Image (cartoon, helix red, strand yellow):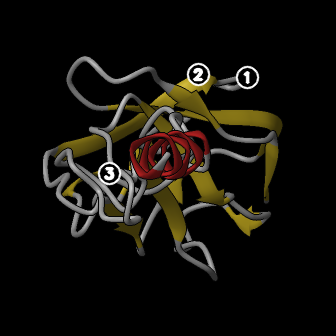
Amino acid sequence: MRRMTMAVLVLAALAACNPTVDEGIFGIGSSGGGSGGGAATHLVFTAQPVTTQATAAMASSVIVQAEDGVGAVDTSYSDVITLSFSANPDGGSLGGNFSVNAINGVATFSNLTVDKADTGYVLLAVSGALTTATSTKFTITP
């Protein structure tokens, strides 16, 4: 009888585990990577580009992070993340520091500029084999 009770307790503990996060029986992660337990698979814009005057630096930073399959930041990710145009309606040039190393899985682009006024610009973020991300549309004013 005692052996059966122990088996039921073990099965109950195993059933309580979340297999998508790989937390193990006691909630301790068993794989490397980010806070969600996995390595980065894709990029996400967490702070979008804003309307800005041509040639002026954007008033707020554009932020891109490397996330794992469950949407957690991979805090071990430190590769270069590069921005370019996905949509460039007027042939503008992207200026400032548009290639930066991620720090704890997050890349901050603090001095981006675009030299030509128009609407409908979209940025593309790329880094190695990760799935790319596109920003929302933004406007550059004269």
Question: Where is mark 1, residue-wise?
Answer: 89
Query: Hey, which residue is sitting farthest bottom in the picture?
Result: 59
Q: Position of residue 129 (x, y in %)?
A: 25, 17
Measured in 3D between alpha carbons, the distance from the residue under mark 2 to the one under mark 3, in whole angstroms, is 14 Å
Horizontal side of residue 92 vs 132, given as left or right: right
Which of marks 3 and 1 precedes in the sequence?
1
Judging depth in this view, the residue of 128 and 6 nearest the camera is 6
- In the depicted structure, whether residue 28 falls above or below residue 131: below
Horizontal side of residue 76 vs 134, given as left or right: left
Question: Where is mark 2, residue-wise?
Answer: 86
Q: Position of residue 103 (x, y in %)?
A: 21, 69
Q: Position of residue 125 (x, y in %)?
A: 44, 35
- Please, what secondary structure does the residue beneath circle 3 have? loop
Question: Where is mark 3, residue-wise?
Answer: 98
Crowdedness of circle 3 by 10 Å Cα count: few (<14), some, many (20+)? many
Could one spot residue 139 in this view of the protein?
yes
Measured in 3D between alpha carbons, the distance from the residue under mark 1 to the one under mark 2, in whole angstroms, is 10 Å
Q: Position of residue 74 (x, y in %)?
A: 32, 53
Judging depth in this view, the residue of 41 and 138 nearest the camera is 41
* Quarter assignment of residue 59: bottom right
Which of marks 3 and 2 precedes in the sequence?
2
* Quarter assignment of residue 79: top left
Give the quarter of the figure containing the C terminus: bottom right
Residue type at tag 2: Ser
Residue type at tag 3: Phe
